[in-house]
Image (cartoon, rainbow, N blue to C red):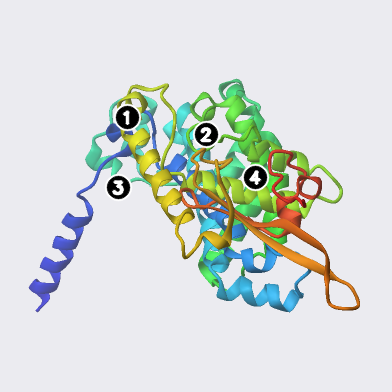
Amino acid sequence: MANNNQTQRQNLSDLLNNGLYIEQATNGKYKSIAFFSLVNALKTYFKTAYDLTDIIGKEGSSTQDQLDKETIYSGYATDVCDTILHLQHFIELYLKEVLLSVSPLLVYDIKKEYEIQLKLIQNQTIPDSDLEKIYYIECGEAIDKLKKIINEPAFVKYKFLGNHFDFFTQINKLRNRIAHRGVFVLKYEYLDELFGKYVFPFISDLKQSDSKYTNILKKDFELKLTVNPFDELIQEYKNTKPNKYKVYVLKMIAHAAYNNKIPSDESTPYGRIMSSFYKDKRKNEEDKANAIYNSNDLNHQFHNLVECPVCGCKTLFVYDDYCDEEDDNGQTTKHYNWINAILCHQCGFQLQERPFLDSSLNGINEINYYEKW
């Protein structure tokens, strides 16, 4: 029995050692999965607007009790936790990359590994078999260490991190609270404030200071719109009272941008190779949408079929609504029509009700579907 257990453990160990090293697999483009964790954090953050669309995305105020229930029982609870976990993971890996770029001695937890210490000091190559045994310092220690040495000449490229250490510390604490206790979920409005005031300004500094991240979301935000969700959210949270309609619309734009399966970037060899494929896919999606729009059974639901401001495909359904004014005799005296909702068949961009469809209320001139005639 003991031999069987030992064999199973060995089999499991062998199984888990069959993988790829990120730096080698990407030819040095990425040193770790930090970038992927950041993208996942952004995707799940923007999705929280979609999770609570039935509450946040409708005109009229919902009670706090309704919002709290939706927070727990919708996909929001899962996505907000994933957002924080991925965000902290990115921060931890990135800070360790920064320390590692100066010296492995700053990152490796090798207090008692004297032979490895000596090899590192003498700039000797350490065998992979030895590296596998080495643990990295924890996130909190990485933050504290960088705080003390960030002004040293070796870190001149990363001085911008000095503006964000308190943010790193608090995110690490929040991650531990979620991961180790699992009883707390950050509320929607405070998640937005966290990103608008702290996360996006950090990412903005990161893009300007570290060339690897300059075009971090170039492909993800290939919008037909000229609006940049990152920059707009940063500006909005500089206001004393951020426009909640605009914040919601920006998040829905970004969420749809991540869902867009038809990129148009032809600036890379891969993009040029795939160009023909995506043109065919675009035509197929537009043909499908057109068939739905012209369906005898469904046509009465739609006011129009137009180009989507996010993905650029002519797959955006525009829904209308109406009301009549009657005189004392029940005769119609006035008839009003207006746009009530939009939904893109391709990327999923959607908005409903006036505050989110009217640029005068949401503060985004290119999103102006609410109208009367």
Q: CA distance from mark 3 to mark 1?
A: 48 Å
Q: Which residue is under mark 2?
A: 222
Q: Secondary structure at mark 3?
A: loop
Tell me whether circle 2 and circle 1 mark residues in contact (CB < 8 Å). Answer: no
Q: Earlier in the sequence, mark 4 or mark 2?
A: 4
Q: Which residue is under mark 3?
A: 133
Identify the disc placed on residue 230: none
Q: CA distance from mark 4 to mark 3?
A: 34 Å
Mark 1 closeness class: few <14, some 14–19, many ≥20 residues within 10 Å:
few
Instruction: Give the vertical position of 59 relative to 144 (above or below).
Output: below
- Where on the picture, by quarter, is residue 322? bottom right
Q: On the picture, is 360 further left or further right than 279?
A: right
Mark 4 closeness class: few <14, some 14–19, many ≥20 residues within 10 Å:
many
Q: Earlier in the sequence, mark 2 or mark 3?
A: 3
Q: Which residue is under mark 4?
A: 199
Q: On the picture, is 82 further left or further right than 48?
A: left
Q: Quadrant of the N terminus?
A: bottom left
Identify the disc placed on residue 276: 1
Q: CA distance from mark 2 to mark 1?
A: 18 Å
Tag nearer the camera, 4 or 3:
4
Mark 2 closeness class: few <14, some 14–19, many ≥20 residues within 10 Å:
many
Q: Earlier in the sequence, mark 4 or mark 3?
A: 3
Of residues 322 and 192, the one nearer the viewer is: 322
